[in-house]
Amino acid sequence: MKKVAFYTLGCKLNFSETSTISRMFEQKGYVKVDFSDQPDIFIVNTCSVTENADKKCKKIVKEAKKISPNSYVAIIGCYAQLKPREIAGIKGVDAVLGAAEKFRLIELLDDFAKEQETKVLASEIKEVDTFHTAYSMNDRTRTFLKVQDGCNYGCAFCTIPLARGKSRSDSIQHIVGAAEEIAASGVKEIVLTGVNIGDFGIQGGKRKERFIDLIKALDEVEGINRFRISSIEPNLLSDEIISFVANSKRFVPHFHIPLQSGSDQILAAMDRRYRSQLYKDRIDHIKTLMPHCCIGVDVITGFPGESDELFMQTYKLLNELPVSYLHVFTYSERANTRAVEMEEVVPMRIRNERSKMLRILSEKKKRKFYEENLGNSAQVLFEEDISDGQMHGFTDNYIRVAAKYDPLLINEVKTVTLLDINSNGVMEVTEPATLFESQF
């Protein structure tokens, strides 16, 4: 039996797809092993959000060939769809599969027999119109469940529509079925993921269902303690969705809402579908209904035309908003995007300086959010994340906690009191009760 190893770069969506593809291999009799266990086959699932992700792909191939020189290396994912010929030129790569082909790689690669030339199987992205159900399993305490793929927005800086195609979704019925399968496996938390999940409901090119109806249906799934929404565009995060989450049985008080810029001028140049006032209104509404809600933000620095004044508009807005952490991206030029042709390019030195400022702000925001929760009772899902005699987990509102290791607590939801923030920025808590209390 051939051994296969997987390596995933990028987002939660990629993790869900890698996990699903790995199960396909196991069902066909392949043995899944760690990257270092001299596999016969390596499958590398790539990202192409930043230039750095492309470089990582090349490094992984190099390391794979060191570990197993005669191995078969196949590259899938966004980078593979965008630049298949470029990847085919990387020494050691045997096959490159695009978005339409990656879920069929076992049948397309002829038992992974090596050939003289790299096999390139990547259809044009306009031909990619099928939704493939995917979810991660046996990888983490929480599962990433893919509910939507592709995007119809076409922001000026983004290659995702070129890499994943148009927006399309699974049906509510199928997603609920997948959630029930996940619940039967013992997983306690599901993270809904996609490229633009607020745009959920497009099937066969037509809108048939709504995201609000999806989360209402999932809220009734027995056996899952928590559902978490991974990321949702502010213009698609309706008051109805916010109100439902505030009163739901299983959806947690945690939103991740991309901002990208606090400057309306830059938002317009980016072709974003909202302005700063709408973003502020969304945050205010969330905090009115859920004062303890965790709110994460994506922000890009150094977009063309971002002057010092416009950057400070972003900084001041984020400083004033009651958000909990930032994911800071330094703008990088991407081929075949409108932004790459724009003038007033911001020097890389300034981009990096601005990114550093926002990362410092993010640490301050996170610290303040944790401090606001000190003394509160919270439910923690403990994970198999153990170091120095302590185990870790997350509260429903995404505060990372540490407690004394107890094997009975892994994958259990327990109530604790949030006591103090340690030197690593992790919340210390009261010792949670184990499953079986001592009677002595």
Image (cartoon, helix red, strand yellow):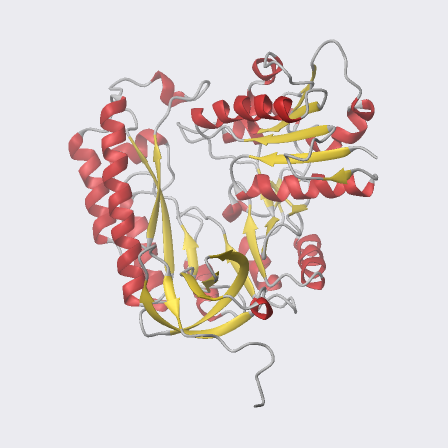
Question: Residue 221, relative to residue 134: is it above or below?
Answer: below
Seen from the viewer's position, the closer of residues 341 and 293 is: 293
Q: Can you give x and y, in whole percent of width and height, for residue 175 in the image? A: 66, 54
Q: Could you say which quadrant of the image residue 128 lies in?
A: top right
Question: Residue 158, relative to residue 123: is it above or below?
Answer: below
* Number of marks: 0
Q: Quadrant of the N terminus?
A: top right
Q: Could you say which quadrant of the image residue 407 lies in?
A: bottom right
Seen from the viewer's position, the closer of residues 89 and 427 is: 427
Seen from the viewer's position, the closer of residues 21 and 168 is: 21
The single residue placed furthest to the bottom in the displayed view is: 440
Q: Can you give x and y, in whole percent of width and height, for residue 358 in the image? A: 26, 41
Residue at 69 percent of width and 31 percent of height: 38
The single residue placed furthest to the left in the displayed view is: 309
Q: Can you give x and y, in whole percent of width and height, for residue 373 in the image? A: 32, 68
Question: Residue 153, relative to residue 297: is it above or below?
Answer: above
On the rendered structure, is 60 left or right of 98?
Answer: left
Q: Could you say which quadrant of the image residue 338 lies in?
A: top left
Residue at 37 percent of width and 55 percent of height: 295
Question: Residue 109, relative to residue 9: is it above or below?
Answer: above
Q: Quadrant of the C terminus?
A: bottom right
Q: Can you give x and y, in whole percent of width and height, for residue 380 in the image? A: 48, 67
Residue at 52 percent of width and 65 percent of height: 381
